Amino acid sequence: MSQFAPHRRHFLLQSMLLGLTLRNGWSASGPIRQGIHQLDGPLLVDGQSADSKTPIRPGQSVATGPEGRLVLVFGQDAFLLGAKTSVDFHAASTPAAITGFTVNSGKILSVFGKGPKLLKLPTTTIGIRGTGIFLQVEPQRDYMCLCYGEVELRMKDTPEIIETIRAKHHDGRYLMKNAPISKAPMSGHTDADLIMLESLVNRTPPFDSADYRG
């Protein structure tokens, strides 16, 4: 009988399957499929009803409905949008790439390839470079979890408040208007979600399996 907890077994299985795929050469050198990978529930693209076959391009706005879920890839970046989430993606000069996005409502988990991006929340602008990050817009505050990588936070109402965060495995913050940046626990996402997103763009997360959080 395996001594691993169920979430650890899931992590190891995911890692093994992805490793086999990489060794077989498809994922390491094969094309990254762009656009929608999964859609549950209704979806609006630029305010128009869309489905899983609708092409979505950088520069467009997407919105999920109640109980919705959208998995999307642009370039080397992958995203998981939760229910009742509205995001404006900002197009880059390179085809299929983005410079960042604005979260109007809801929550989004993102993994990014190399290069700088600018993410915007109602309270904060976030400069990133090759990170995994979870963002959620709440009625009274915003929430950020840096899953791994580095970010620079700048509060919109108090631009003198700047914080640089580096994390190997989940470092959360609450972000509120006219208030200091405060520590927050990890919530709203899992390492399994990060593994799934990174696999869509031929990568694996940098955290150790011993730190896995299902």
Image (tube, rainbow, N blue to C red):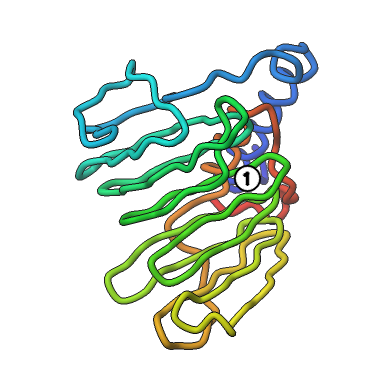
> Which residue is at 44% across, 81% downward?
157
Left/right placement of residue 107 relative to residue 19 reads left
Which residue occupies the foreground of this view, 190 or 87?
Answer: 87
Q: Which residue has dot 1 on it?
A: 8
Position of residue 41 in the picture relative to residue 145 (left or right): left
Quadrant assignment for the N terminus:
top right
Amino acid type, mark 1: Arg
At horizontal 53% and vertical 47% (from top left) the residue drawn is 100
Instruction: Give the number of callouts.
Output: 1
Q: Where is residue 82 in the image (x, y as percent from the top left)?
A: 35, 46
Q: Position of residue 163 (x, y in %)?
A: 64, 77
Q: Position of residue 137 (x, y in %)?
A: 36, 63
- Mark 1 is surrounded, within 10 Å at the Cα level, by few (under 14), some (14 to 19) or many (20 or more) other residues, namely some
In the image as oriented, which residue stretches furthest toward the right? 23
User: What residue is rendered at 31% in x and 48% in y?
Assistant: 86
On screen, 186 above or below 17? below
**Residue shown at the point (20%, 30%) measured from the top left:** 48
Q: In this view, does 74 lie to the left or right of 168?
A: left
Residue extending farthest front: 93
Residue 109, image x, y percentages = 49, 48
